Image (cartoon, helix red, strand yellow):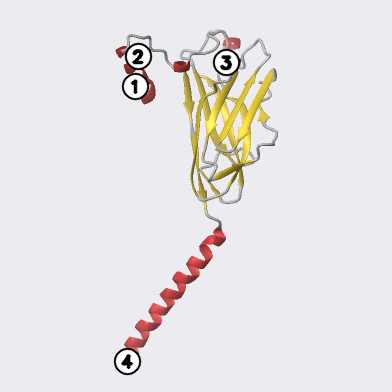
Amino acid sequence: MKFWIATCLIAALSNTACAEFSLQLRTQVTDLGGTEISSIAMGQQFKLQTIATDIRNPPRTNPFHRGVNSAGVDISYDSFLSSLDTTQSIEYGAFFNLFQVAQLEPGRIQAFAASAEFRGPGNDPQFLFSVVLTAERPGLQAFTPTLLSWPDTPNGIYTDDIPLPLERIEFVGASVLILPEPSAFAPAAIAIASLFALGRRRVSSRRLQQ
């Protein structure tokens, strides 16, 4: 909402129209079973999903005129923290069965899909696609989606402008905290415990001498 208000202020200053968001493209991090997560251990695999949602308010009167029929994103991330098998088969949402195209490279995920259905699926969030990554190093891994600038890959919602203007698309990123392997804590824990025990022995020795 804050981003939309700022966009409207800029539009007002430039004497251009201000449109509310109509399409939301959101990334989310999940485990391999599809459950959303906020952290993961180093060395484990996880999924990055993109969810497309028709967020027009109010929604279209006809329920079959609601939903997303085509969408694509360009997602950037830190390839130092996570690795990506660029030869993997991307999982697409079953609704987007007309056209699917993607390009995977370290630090960047680009994908687009479109539906052949004449009736929209409604306003519920629609699964667009997902890829699998591996957590390589500790740190906060951020994923930032932006507009996919390939030709003939329009973002579209039912019975509305195609391609949808950029100012009517809301991009929502995600992040996941990559934690060190549990074994990495062991040497440090042993060292701390040894120092603590040594300190206690020294204190006990002084008390005996007194």
Label 4 is placed on what type of residue? Gln
Q: Earlier in the sequence, mark 2 or mark 3?
A: 2
Q: Foreground residue, 80 or 98?
A: 80
Name the residue tied to disc 3: 154
Label 3 is placed on what type of residue? Pro
Quadrant housing the N terminus: top left
- How far apart in space, not on screen, are marks 1 and 3 (Cα)? 25 Å
Q: Neighbour class for label 2 at 10 Å: few (<14), some, many (≥20)? A: some
- How far apart in space, not on screen, are marks 2 and 4 (Cα)? 80 Å
Q: Neighbour class for label 1 at 10 Å: few (<14), some, many (≥20)? A: few
Residue drawn 57% across and 49% down?
136
The reply to whether residue 2 is visible in this rendering is: yes
**Could you tell me residue 65's position as x and y percent?**
58, 10
Q: Foreground residue, 65 or 92?
A: 92
3 vs 4, front mark = 3
Name the residue tied to disc 1: 6
Q: Earlier in the sequence, mark 2 or mark 4?
A: 2
Q: Earlier in the sequence, mark 3 or mark 4?
A: 3
- How far apart in space, not on screen, are marks 3 and 4 (Cα)? 83 Å
Name the residue tied to disc 2: 11
Residue drawn 38% across and 12% down?
18
Residue 209, disc: 4
